[in-house]
Amino acid sequence: MPLEFASAANRTILARHHQYRIDEALAESRYRSRFRNWDRLATVRNNPIRPLGDSGELFFTPELVRSLDHPILAGADSRTREAVLVHRLYEYLKFTIDLEQSAVIPVTGHISRGMAGLELPELMRADAFKIVTDEAWHAQFTYELMREVRTRTGIAPALPTVPAFTEVLARIHEELPSQIRGLDEMLFAIVSETLISSG
Ligand SMILES: [Fe+2]
């Protein structure tokens, strides 16, 4: 009798395993990779870092910098106003670097290694490795651009070492129930990267 039970249980396990393999194969066949031409098209493969142009253009769009409308800056000389634009550019570039390095790459790294708590097709995980590379490249060339602006202008960035958004994220993470902790990081990476990509 115990043997009979064991063989029935084994059959159930085998059936489940079989079903899982079928589901897995289905997911694989349905996945349409958008990275099939990655080797040929990826910026990191094709475009070396371009040096900053010498066209004498402003470093940031003044219309997007509201502080320039403040009476103190509105009446300031052009050098001061341009310095504000440079600092706004630093802020934007540093935010990009922080976002890639502290929010996007950790999540895509977990996905690529199968540690994100998701069951994903093998090909999708392989693509996640390419995303990690792309995002690391975004951060790298953004950092190089920052260095170049500093050399060109002689203006040193004056930004906090720890970005404000990481502290907020850490607090949200701690406050979440343990069953869904981690989902916050993934959602933040998805939303922020989509905003940047579509911006
Ligand atoms: Fe990115």
Image: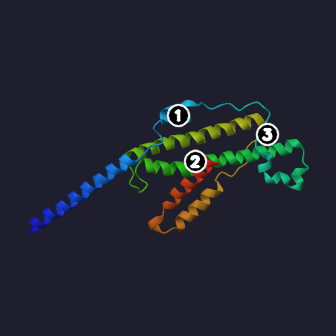
Marks 1 and 3 close (CB-CB < 8 Å): no
The earlier-in-sequence mark between 1 and 2 is 1
Find residue 23 and report its image quarter: bottom left
Q: Nearer the viewer, residue 122 or 176?
A: 122
Left-right relation of 115 to 67: left
Question: Within 10 angstroms of label 3, few (less than 14), some, or many (20 or more) residues?
Answer: few
Which is more N-terminal, label 3 or label 1? Answer: 1
Q: Amino acid at mark 3?
A: Leu
Q: Residue furthest right?
A: 75
Is 24 drawn above or below residue 167 in the view shown? above
Q: Residue at x 51, y 67 (%)?
A: 176
- Tell which circle, 2 or 3, labels the residue nearer the N-terminal end: 3
Q: Secondary structure at mark 3?
A: loop
* Mark 2 CB within 8 Å of ligand 1: yes
Few, some or many residues within 10 Å of mark 1 (<14, 14–19, 20+): few
Q: Amino acid at mark 2?
A: Glu
Which residue is tagged 3? 58
Task: Identify residue for label 2.
Answer: 100
